[in-house]
Structures are given as C-alpha cells and as structure tokens.
Amino acid sequence: MKQDRFLLGILIGIFVLVLVALGLFFTRHNNQEYLSADTPEAIVFNYVLAVTERDYEKAYGYLADLDHKPTYDEFRQSFFKGEVSPNGVGVDVGEATVHGNEASVELNMLYSASDPFSTGYTSLEYALLIKQGDEWKISSMPYMFWSYNWYQPIVKP
C-alpha cells in the first residue's frame, strides 16, 4: 500500500512537470526586436533577424549598393531555392572593428549537431560592411546567410 502511494506521487510529479514544460513551450514569445540601425553590429544583427524571420525585403535593404548587386528577386530566390539556408545555425553577433568607411563584425556561428550522438560546434567568422552615405551596409556575410553569386560579375563564355 505504501509503495503504491509512493509510485502514485512520482507519477503525479512527472505529470505536473510535463504540463509545466508544455505550458512554457506554448506560451513563450520570441522577444527578438530590431535594433537601432546606427552601428555595424546592429546592422548585422538586424540582417540576421530579418533573414531568420523571412522578411527578405527588410534584409535586402541592408545590402550594400555595389556593382553586380543581386536584384530583390534574385536575393529572395536564393532563399527559396535553398542556395542560402540559415536553418540549423545560430549567430552571436560580437564586436565590430571600424577602419574609416569599412567595418568587420565578429560572428560566432553556432552549428547544430548533424546526428544525436555528436555535439554542435562553433566557428568564428566575420561580416564585412561599408559606409554608404550615413548608413552602414553589408558587403559580405558568412555562408548560410550569403550567396557567393551575389556581387559577382556575370561571365559570358
């Protein structure tokens, strides 16, 4: 009899924990908000957020106006075709180094594990920006957020 009560108590405790976990999962909100676009770090953060939220029009607005810039449709199609896919990677935006009208921003790329028996890994990479007028614009980002076809001249055979 005493063991039945103990087992029942454990089962009730597990049930309550499952309910709390489900409640937290379904009620949590994504509190990511865009930053004021006045620093290179903020521009990179906003670009990554726009891409992950699939707000391609906003993300496209952060690209530098340089030769061979992709059109908006080319930019958007890169994501739809899977040429650029930020799935399975997290980004921790670090410090910026500014040299005149150019800046580089440290990005800790957090890659998820490919199978249940391994751990993910991190990689330090950089985003490059240039100042155009009074605004910072992105001229290069790491793979997963950037297509290396962008800003490349079209080679005709």
Image (cartoon, rainbow, N blue to C red):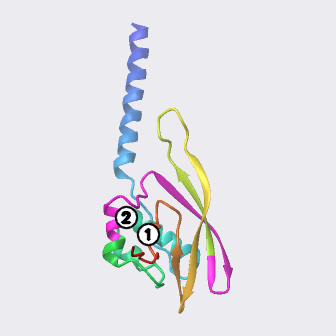
Q: Along the line of sight, which residue is nearer the eye, 33 or 91? A: 91
In the rendered image, the residue lying farthest to the top is 1
* Crowdedness near tag 1: few (<14), some (14–19) or many (≥20) residues, C-alpha within 10 Å: some
Q: Is residue 32 above or below residue 88?
A: below
Q: How many marks do you count on the picture?
A: 2
Q: Is mark 1 on a helix, strand or loop?
A: loop
Q: Is mark 2 on a helix, strand or loop?
A: loop
Picture quarter with the N terminus: top left
Q: Mark 2 points at which residue?
A: 53
- The residue sitting at 34% across, 77% down in the picture is 72
Q: Mark 1 points at which residue?
A: 149
The disc labelled 1 sits on which kind of residue? Answer: Asn
Q: Along the line of sight, which residue is nearer the eye, 5 or 43? A: 43
In the rendered image, the residue lying farthest to the front is 157
Left or right? Give the position of 46 relative to 15.
right
Q: Which residues are drawn in magenta?
A: 76-103
In which quarter of the view is residue 42 placed?
Answer: bottom right
First in sequence: mark 1 vs mark 2: 2
Q: Along the line of sight, which residue is nearer the eye, 32 or 123? A: 123
Q: Where does residue 69 sit, x and y in percent of width and height?
A: 43, 80
Q: Where does residue 32 sit, x and y in percent of width and height?
A: 45, 65
Pointer 1 with pointer 2, Cβ within 8 A: no
In the rendered image, the residue lying farthest to the bottom is 133
Q: How far apart are marks 1 and 2 (CA)?
A: 22 Å
* Crowdedness near tag 2: few (<14), some (14–19) or many (≥20) residues, C-alpha within 10 Å: few
Q: Where does residue 2 sit, x and y in percent of width and height?
A: 43, 9
In which quarter of the view is residue 155 placed?
Answer: bottom left
Q: In this view, does 141 lie above or below 25?
A: below
Q: Where does residue 61 sit, x and y in percent of width and height?
A: 41, 80
